[in-house]
Amino acid sequence: MKIVHAKNYDEMSQKAAAEFISLIAEKPDALLGLATGSSPVGMYQCMIEAYKAGKISFKNIRSFNLDEYYPITPDNDQSYRYFMDTNLFNAVDIDKNNTRVPDGQTKDPDGFGAKYDEAIAAEGGIDLQILGVGPNGHIGFNEPDSELLLGTHLTALKETTIAANARFFASEADVPRHALTMGLGSIFAAKKIVVLLTGNGKKGVYEKLLEGKVSTECPATLLHLHPDCTVFVDDSIL
Ligand code: GLP
């Protein structure tokens, strides 16, 4: 794992966007692994600017998102589908048929999870996966636990996550209690991973990463085991 310091959120966003921009320039039909939350918003903005400047096109880009609340409809402004449309997809020339977000309305979450992982593999695997990290060290919605699942699955959110995400909802009671998330195996299958570590309450996660140990009780530490993982850390943590 490579840990790279950035002097602020903007610099972190630019550095992470540069990884995506050079991939898209080299491989115009790359398969991107995308994430939501406050962490990647600035990075998506830099990618939109690169598109508007004519440096890259998303015409043949394909994407799979990491997670989605459950149950939720795609037109709900708290859904991760809505987030992706408004923070990236609507501003670039991507074909939305090539963008996949876990189906927050599926009646068969187990079957859906298996198909989602199969579809990623069938399309050649994720070239570059962006990840944020929760204050409790979760990646996607893989919450701290004694055991973690490999495939895409339905999970119950921890109270710490419900509290951390309540800022996006009218009240904590409105935060969904479940989510669909790629599992550790789905995430680790990505050829390259970029992590954004920014935001309040995550210093503890950074310290854990520096300890150089791995624990399922802090899922982000498992990224030490990935062969090509870079963590960008901004001044909110340092
Ligand atoms: C959310 C999402 C994660 C996200 C993380 C950090 O709950 N499930 O995919 O990366 O928590 O969120 P933020 O970037 O808003 O701090």
Image (tube, rainbow, N blue to C red):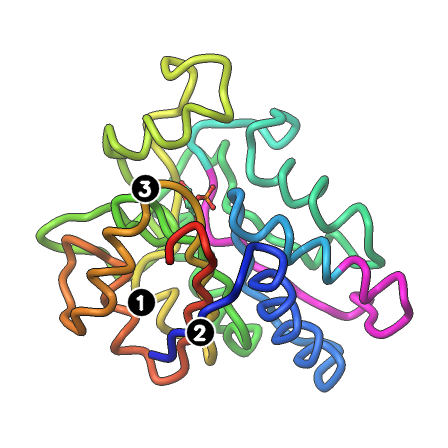
Q: Which residues are magenta?
A: 48-68
Q: Tag 3's secondary structure?
A: loop
- Label pair 2/3, CB-CB below 8 angstroms: no
Find the distance from the CA under tag 1 to the CA under tag 3.
27 Å
Find the distance from the CA under tag 2 to the CA under tag 3.
19 Å
Is residue 212 rendered to the left or right of residue 96?
left
Residue 62, percent from left and from top: 67, 65
Q: Which mark is nearer the camera, 1 or 3?
A: 3
Count numbered badges in the picture. Answer: 3
* Residue 54 among those drawn in magenta: yes
Image quadrant assignment for residue 184:
bottom left
**Where ligand 1 lies, by image quadrant?**
top left
Residue 110, percent from left and from top: 33, 46
Q: Quadrant of the N terminus?
A: bottom left
User: Which of the labelled discs sits on residue 194, or is there none?
Assistant: none
Q: Tag 2's secondary structure?
A: strand
Q: Tag 1's secondary structure?
A: helix
Q: Residue at x 49, y 20 (%)?
A: 169
In this view, 1 is above or below 81:
below
Q: Label 2 belongs to which residue?
A: 4
Question: Which three-letter amino acid code belongs to the residue tagged 3?
Answer: Gly
Is residue 171 rendered to the left or right of residue 60?
left
In this view, 225 is above or below 147:
below
